Amino acid sequence: MMERLDIDQIASRLASLVPPGLADAQKDLRANFRDVLAQGLRRLDLVTREEFEVQSQLLARTRANVDELEKRVAELEALATSRGE
């Protein structure tokens, strides 16, 4: 999930785009932008970096196991073929 600081930075950038004549509204707009951004991100089905890394490691281990099993099956098939089975 995005860090609170990142959301605050985006909200500040959006508020800075408000025309100078509406400078008084910038503080309110910044808060509203921040809330809208945070709410929108919460609605997304996102995972944390930690969860992503755990799943990546699990997938890598699973892939290694599959590769090893494929190698073993190929060896057994070659053995069976050489025995005439």
Image (cartoon, helix red, strand yellow):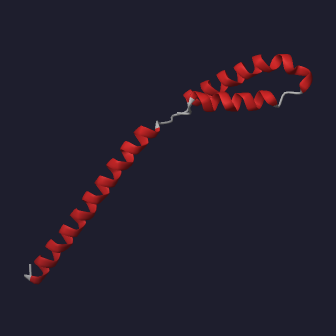
Q: Residue at x 25, y 58 (%)?
A: 65
Residue 84 position within the rendered picture, expressed as x and y whole percent measured from the top left: 9, 82
Q: Residue at x 21, y 63 (%)?
A: 69
Left-right relation of 22 to 33: right
Where is the C terminus found, in terms of image quarters?
bottom left
Q: Residue at x 70, y 19 (%)?
A: 31
Left-right relation of 39 to 48: right
Count of all numbered marks drawn on residues in the image: 0
Q: Tell me: residue 39, above or below residue 63.
A: above
Classify residue 28 by image quadrant. Answer: top right
Residue 64 position within the rendered picture, expressed as x and y whole percent measured from the top left: 28, 59
Question: Toward the viewer: 23 or 42?
Answer: 23
Classify residue 4 by image quadrant. Answer: top right
Left-right relation of 30 to 70: right
Q: Tell me: residue 55, above or below residue 43.
A: below
Question: Toward the viewer: 67 or 50?
Answer: 50
Left-right relation of 57 to 48: left
Classify residue 44 by image quadrant. Answer: top right
Residue 79 position within the rendered picture, expressed as x and y whole percent measured from the top left: 11, 77
Question: Toward the viewer: 47 or 84?
Answer: 47
Q: Tell me: residue 74, above or below residue 65.
A: below
